[in-house]
Image (cartoon, rainbow, N blue to C red):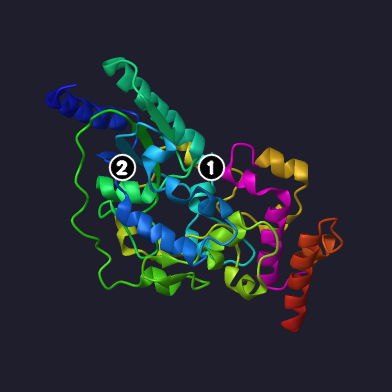
Amino acid sequence: MTPQQAEDLARDIKMWSAELGLSACSITDTDLGEHETHLLNWLNDGFHGEMEYMQRHGTKRSRPAMLEPGTFRIVSVRLDYFPPEAADANSVLSSSQLGYVSRYALGRDYHKVLRQRLQKLANKITDKTGKFSYRAFTDSAPVLEKAIAEKAGLGWIGKHSNLLSETAGSWFFLGELFTDLPLPVDPPQPSAHCGSCTACIDACPTRAIVAPFRVDARRCISYLTIELDGTIPEEFRSAMGNRIYGCDDCQLVCPFNKFSSPTTVTDFNPRYNLDAPELCNLFAWSEDEFNTQMQGSPIRRIGYWNWLRNIAVALGNAAHSDSVMKALNSRKDSENAILREHVAWALKEHENRGR
């Protein structure tokens, strides 16, 4: 492939990406040395908590050619996900009778949606170049996707550790095509633009952003409600409020999200009223109902009992009512020991508040 052919192919890749509905596309190389140092320091501090796979994969995450031999360039893409039809996030957070689900998880599992588009992009490249070596990723393997996107010029990693775009905020997913094609690379942004702003640090309910650009996952509500399997430490339960799957607080207060665009992907529209669900109704679901309702949703992977565990904490933080107490008492003798313990905590919270 001549340099001109490589330039033409890179231009076509970005054109095809837009045609496939991807929000942005850029290309970078595989040198992530600076980010590897940050990763290793983060792991050494134990900030990954029980996500032992982070430690197990080690530098494979920051050395793309170790993960996929022959990788020379990475095509990094962005797909906006904020659903315009969703109930107002702050209104849901302010109502203790409702449960808050991170806006990324209201619709269909993004892994499938984004992977399909990356595969179509790879097919278009194949049609033009013939067979080439590639592998698509959508948060599905040890990949430093935010570091790759930052290096490719799609944005910068903000103080909350999410990727930020000056023109698109942070309500988007990232995906990658690792490839052996000798494509020209795009320059990174010249600098981050967070400046002196500390809105995300100040807003974090559990103080998980322990310093600018450093997040202790063990304190993060997204980790506690999604990644943690077992008992949620009591010290964080009250601060969780009504957040039952993930947490968006650091994004909700970020001034750059005023520039974000609502998604045009209908797969990300809310399902089963998850944008503003009533806690008592969710808590009454049987395991079959959970599995049926969450078919095709990213929420399903946490499992039924962790789902109920999260809701029990939210009910413990809810305003006292007959319906809340009835819901909690219905599960106080659950067969699941973890759920029983969280329900007991929730009932005690209501008792301690004098009700």
By secondary structure, the bulk of the magenta-drawn segment is best described as: helix
Residue at horizontal 39 percent and vertical 48 percent from the top: 62
Query: Disc 2 marks which residue?
Result: 30
> Which residue is the site of mark 1?
107
Query: What percent of the width, then of the height, locates residue 330?
Result: 83, 60
What quarter of the picture does the N terminus occupy?
top left
> In this rendering, is residue 246 above or below 304?
below
Residue 251, position as x, y percentages in the image: 41, 60
Type of amino acid at the residue the image marks with label 1 = Gly
Give the residue drawn at x 64%, y 42%.
Answer: 294
The span from disc 2 to disc 1 (Cα, nearest Å) is: 32 Å
Q: Is residue 302 covered in magenta?
A: yes
Name which of mark 2 and mark 1 comes first in the sequence.
Answer: 2
Expressed as whole percent of the image width and height from the top left, the position of residue 155 reads: 28, 52
Residue 34 located within the stretch drawn in magenta: no
Magenta highlight range: 294-322
| Label 2 neighbour load within 10 Å: few <14, some 14-19, many 20+ | some
**Res 145 visible:** yes
Mark 2 residue element: loop
Q: How crowded is mark 1: few (under 14 residues within 10 Å), some or many (20 or more)?
A: many
